[in-house]
Image (cartoon, rainbow, N blue to C red):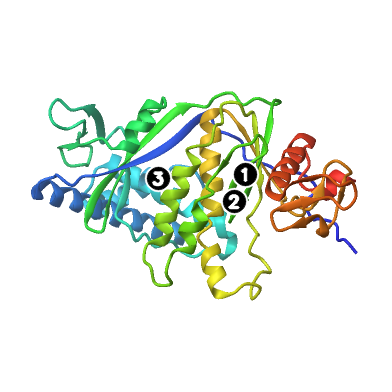
Amino acid sequence: MIKRHKKSASPIMAPQRATLRRTSRVFLNELNSGKQATIKAFLLLCHTVTQYFVDLLWQRKDFSADLADLPTIHLACDRFGITTRLSQAMAKQAKECLRAAFERDGKKAHRPNIHRLTSTLYSHFIEIQTFDGSFDLAVKMIGSGAPRLVIPCRSTKHLNGLLKRGFKIGKTLRMGVRDGRIFIDFLLEKERPVVKKTGRAVGMDSNYVNGFVFSDGQNVGQELVEKIRGFAKRTKHTHQLIKDMVGAELKKIDLSQIDMLVIEDLKWVKNGKHGKFSRQMNRRLSHWLYAYVADWLARCCEEAGVRLERKNPAYTSQYCRHCNKWDRRNRTGDKFVCVGCGHADHADKNASKNLELLGLAGVYGLRLLQS
């Protein structure tokens, strides 16, 4: 007996913004000790004021998106001796923190505790300028409650890559401390390209052994399985190493001739798999970064104007699109041979073509396609 799948259509996607947003982090390793001490003291003050507003608004059960009123703003001004503008900015960040916790957990939400020394600085506090000298950029802190400093910083490969792809540095940034090192997160924006409603669809099957197999003939990441199998049990930093390798392989994908990319919805791929694989196999499968790959493809498709669809992967490697029947006997290892009509293909290539078929049909899974 085959149970009906719970999902009847593709998941509803959130409304898209008019602009694309990216973040690039730059560590300020060349600041002198005086500037480092001043910035850390300022970030500690911002952290204390923000936590004060979190506690105050939590007691009032104020989870709205409205700006805090002036009497509330002046409470922090009198308590910490800060300007009204800085107090208002910290109250806004506290509101965002509370609203995020309430939207995530609802009535079960707990009062947030801010642990990181990170603060968002708007154009009232900083100006981003080009630097005439050995540095590339300069962040000028112009007061309004912030210390008056000029912070020189060097551009990174990641930041330069975003600028080459048409992103522009915004007027807002985040500044914080991580492991004793001060960093700046530059916020970049770019107009979102127009996404075509119809056009060429390509399916992608993600496979631990054969990498990423596309229905248009592309295949990347085949060498990763040997790297993963070569890791010893106690080898450190393996996940970061594989993430770097997967990112390098994904950059080889050509999206220029694709209008819609259809991938597998692998959010619940590990459910019900407890105890079915050996410890060694589980360790190897943990290196296949499904969520990282999906997020990476989503960002690239946004920039390229490609529509990204996620479909149910169930039975895609066992389904024959020629006779519209599926059977577990159709697949043996990497080989696909239909027991009904005799159609033969590579199992992962067959799965990618079935994902392409789901994208063209506009349904979430094969059961809906058959009905």
Residue displayed at 56% across by 69% down: 282
In the picture, measured across the screen, residue 232 lies left or right of residue 45, that is right
Kind of element beneath mark 2 = loop
Q: Measure the alpha-carbon separation of dots 3 and 2.
A: 48 Å
Image coordinates for residue 294, horizontal then vertical, percent: 56, 47
Callout 2 crowding tier (Cα within 10 Å): few <14, some 14–19, many ≥20: some
Nearer mark to the viewer, of 3 and 1: 1
Residue position for label 2: 210
Asked where in the image residue 262 lies, by quadrant, the reply is top right
Image coordinates for residue 86, horizontal then vertical, percent: 28, 43
Circles 2 and 1: CB distance less than 8 Å?
yes
Mark seen at residue 213: 1
Residue displayed at 31% across by 51% down: 118
Residue position for label 3: 92
Q: Measure the alpha-carbon separation of dots 2 and 1.
A: 7 Å
Name which residue type carries label 2: Asn
Q: Measure the alpha-carbon separation of dots 3 and 1.
A: 46 Å
Image coordinates for residue 196, horizontal then vertical, percent: 65, 25
Specify the quadrant that holds the N terminus: bottom right
